[in-house]
Amino acid sequence: MKKLCLSIAALALPAIALAQTGEAEATAPSPNQIVDAATPEEWVSIPADDLLVMTLAPDRDGNAREVVIQLMPEPFSQGWVHNIKLLARSGWYDGISVNRVQDNYVVQWGDPNYDNPESGGEAKPLPYGLKVMGEDEYVSYTKNLFDSIAGQNSSDLYASQNWVRSGWPLAGDDESRWPVHCYGMVGVGRNYSPDTGSGAELYTVIGHAPRHLDRNIALVGRVIEGMEHLSSLPRGKGELGFYADFEKDKRTPILSVRIASDRIEFPMPSFEYLSTESESFARYAEARANRRDPFFIHPAGGADICNIPVPVRRVVGE
Amino acid sequence: MKKLCLSIAALALPAIALAQTGEAEATAPSPNQIVDAATPEEWVSIPADDLLVMTLAPDRDGNAREVVIQLMPEPFSQGWVHNIKLLARSGWYDGISVNRVQDNYVVQWGDPNYDNPESGGEAKPLPYGLKVMGEDEYVSYTKNLFDSIAGQNSSDLYASQNWVRSGWPLAGDDESRWPVHCYGMVGVGRNYSPDTGSGAELYTVIGHAPRHLDRNIALVGRVIEGMEHLSSLPRGKGELGFYADFEKDKRTPILSVRIASDRIEFPMPSFEYLSTESESFARYAEARANRRDPFFIHPAGGADICNIPVPVRRVVGE
């Protein structure tokens, strides 16, 4: 029972400990317990062709660091997804680095010599075949897509409609749909002009959802494993969290970025997400919005879209 | 101009670079530019009696690590604030450690032997004079407080009203008011019973605002400097992000926690926040909700309460 108290003192998810004692039977299940009880059929396999495996240089203690990113499916951001696969398959990402870590905002990686005359090095030439993506591509005009959604959509300060649907956090208005900047989502850095982001410069969100970036920067996926290797990096002291000249040694080298289906290692990493159209997901989302597990005094009565993260699990290749 | 492009490629706050070129004159100011232009009278001094200075052990390279926390003013959480000042002044916090780092959630510090039979050590006795705080203390029944607020309140999925007011993010209903779990807010860990949190166990938010904790755990302040020393700590591999037995050496020692007004060092650290009732704050909040600086294609039209962080600056003691 003392071990139980440690978990309770932890201020959250106490049901994990409760589940071991049997007491949970008398109380409402936690969101995690609902996910654990989902049937095998409710889990959806993520295509290996949509998985990017990014290998960082080992940490100071020699521990390996691998980050897995799930790329977005159609109809969203497919031109950038095309570019990212091309950049990965051409080996372009190999040898770039993490150049920016801004607290409560983003971690950004790319060519440290890109647009950086102070670096003393030449920018890396990009491969042929990259698509140029225009302003319209930041949203999808899919008025009839997800028409049948009921129950889980919500209006908030950023969009008249928000859903977790087809495995992703999405927002929309009467005409269009777009993905949402939640924690761990991956996007494409760009210059002023909307058509300047190729996919060579990527970032992920490491703080409160910067929803003002929705429809202004393209989202292409999300980190599904190894997020801690990015979110715990030292913050940059330069402007916007870039590593300043005097701390260039803090840039984390990226050894390689591979598409899982191209890897020759066996077994290939493989992941599943809990179908956002499943009954278990609906129960999970409802429980996130109305916490009734014993720790809680006041169930919130709602949850914003970024507080209902889609459960993802690794199924092979540990 | 090449240096300008680096900032633009940074995907956000490009106006910082623009301000240096004069181009910004032709465009709408960014939120940061509005803050920089605030008058001295719009800044409010934070009482030194409300500042906790937490000194962590130096990092692996020998760099000092100091975290400054601003405690909440009346009418919120004053019993816990009393306890925290008592714990600080009695030296109780000296020698405790950071024991939990859960990605996209919280960093938690306290006595590593508290409720932890596996630690092999005795829990530290608490000082006399700590107040026991009951369930009612998680909100303030201040119906008439902030009655005159107009313009900046918003309804969201968590509360019928939200304001940034009196320097803090607050939510409310017809009867009561309570502080909000935004990034960097500091709260009091507790066990199941609402009256079990003394203030000896504290945490701060390092991810998307966990608003479901509002009214369920007491908030007592926020980190106003040195957040990166907590948010970039290695994530724990144990349950709920606690450091597991095999990685106990990752616990960061807390050397001391002092109230700024008690420190004998000169100069005393001193901070100001931008008055949330000032004209500049209103303009800043509006600009956060409607980004018109040149990078943006689609101003969001709104901003949730945790995306309008109160600007804070150090004024002495660098």
Image: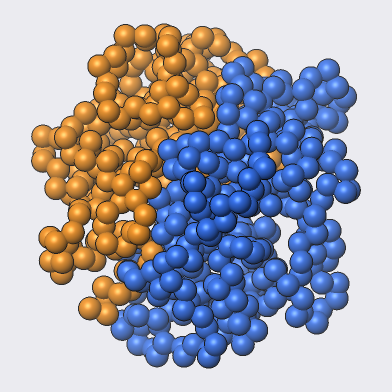
Chain colours: A orange, B blue
Q: Residue A94, percent across and down? A: 49, 34
The answer to whether B13 is drawn above or below residue A314 in the figure is above
The front one of B85 and A1 is B85
Q: Position of residue A202 (x, y in %)?
A: 52, 31
In this rendering, position of residue A19 left or right of residue A309: left
Depth check: give the residue in front, A102 or A170: A170
Q: Quadrant of the N terminus of chain A?
A: bottom left
- The image quadrant of residue A147 is top left
Task: Judge whether B73 appears above or below B211 on screen.
Answer: below
Q: Residue at x 38, y 47 (%)?
A: A300
The residue at the point 48 percent across, 40 percent down is B160
Q: Quadrant of residue A123?
A: top right
Q: Indicate the position of residue A6 as horizontal and vertical percent values.
A: 33, 73
Image coordinates of residue B170 in percent, x first then y, are: 57, 49
User: Viewer-proximal residue, A134 or B161?
Assistant: B161
Q: Does residue A13 appear to the left or right of B91 in the view shown?
A: left
> Looking at the image, which residue is at 55% across and 36% down?
B154
The residue positioned 26% from the left and 23% from the top of the image is A150
In the displayed structure image, the side of residue B218 where residue B275 appears, left or right: right
Instruction: Please say whether residue B314 is visible from this viewpoint.
Output: no
Q: Residue furthest front?
A: B144
Q: Is residue A145 above or below residue B103?
A: above
Q: How many marks?
A: 0
